[in-house]
Amino acid sequence: MDSEAMDRAVPFGDRRSRTLYRLAAAISETRRPDEVLLVGVDGVDGAGKTVFADELAEVLERRGIGVLRASVDGFHRPSSIRYRRGRRSPEGFFLDSYDYDAVRRLLLEPLAEPGERQVVRRIYDVHAEEPIEAVWESTSDVEVLVFDGIFLHRPELRDLWDLSIFLEVDFNVSIPRGAGRGDGDPDPTAASNRRYVEGQKLYLATCRPQERATWVIDNNVLADAYLTDEPQN
C-alpha cells in the first residue's frame, strides 16, 4: 500500500489524528534527496511536545520514512550554570538552561552536511546531574529529524529548522499538565512556578515563535489538537 492509500485507510477518530497526518504528508513532500530534513517541535513546558513529536515520528515511519528522534533535554547545562543567576531566576531559565552550541555542533549541523553523518543525541543527564559520555551514531538511513524542546526558535537554533511546529497551550493548561507528571505545583501563580512561567513569557515576547513557526497547533485539548490556520466551525 502506498503512503497516500495508507493515509486514506487510517480511521481518523479525532482531529489530532487528522492534524498529525496532514503534517506528515507535508513533511514527506518537503523532503529532498540525500538530505535530512530538520523538524523542530516547540512549545512551553507542559505543552505536550514530546508526545506530539513521538506521534509525528510514528506517522512518518508508517509512511516508510527514516526518522531520528531527539530532544533539547539531552543537552542541559550543569546545574552550576543553569542556576548561576539564582534558582528562581526567569532570566536564568531562559538564558542558561541548554547548551545550544552543542546542539548545533553535535547534532543539527552534522545532519545538514552531505555524506556520512555521525551525530550525538545526549550529553547530559539532568536527573542524575552528570555528563553523559558522547555516543556517536550513524544516521545513514535517516531522512527526517524530529526534535522537540522549549525555546527552539531562539536565534541560536531558529535558522537551522527546515520546518517547525509551535504547540500553543495556555499556562493554565500547561502548568497543571506538567504537574500531572510529577513536575511541581499545578497552580500557574505558585512561587515555585515563577521561574518557568516568566522565563517562557520572556521567550514568547522576545523570540515570537508563533510568528516564526511553519505551523502553529492549538494543543490545549489533546484529542482536539488542530492547526490554527484551519477554519473553525
Image (spheres, grey):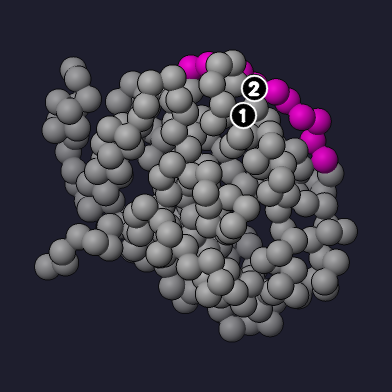
- Three-letter amino acid code at the position of disc 2: Gln
Displayed quadrant of residue 107: top right
In the picture, measured across the screen, residue 57 lies left or right of residue 78, that is left
Whether the residues at callouts 1 and 2 have beta carbons within 8 Å, the answer is yes
Locate the N terminus by quadrant: top left
Q: How many marks?
A: 2
Give the residue at mark 1: 110
For residue 25, above or below residue 168: above
Secondary structure beneath disc 2? strand
- Three-letter amino acid code at the position of disc 1: Pro
Secondary structure beneath disc 1? helix
- For the stretch drawn in magenta, the main secondary structure is loop
173 or 205: nearer the eye? 205
Residue 196: x and y, percent? Answer: 64, 71
* Range of magenta residues: 131-141
Residue 142: x and y, percent? Answer: 48, 23
Camera-side mark, 1 or 2: 1
Residue 135: x and y, percent? Answer: 73, 25
For residue 82, above or below residue 27: below
Residue 30: x and y, percent? Answer: 32, 34
In the picture, measured across the screen, residue 42 lies left or right of residue 96, that is left
Give the residue at mark 2: 118
At 49% across and 34% down in the image, what residue appears?
145
115 or 150: nearer the eye? 115
Q: Residues within 10 Å of mark 1 (few under 14, many from 20)?
A: some
Of the residues under marks 1 and 2, which one precedes in the sequence?
1
For residue 2, above or below residue 106: above
At 28% across and 57% down in the image, what residue appears?
227
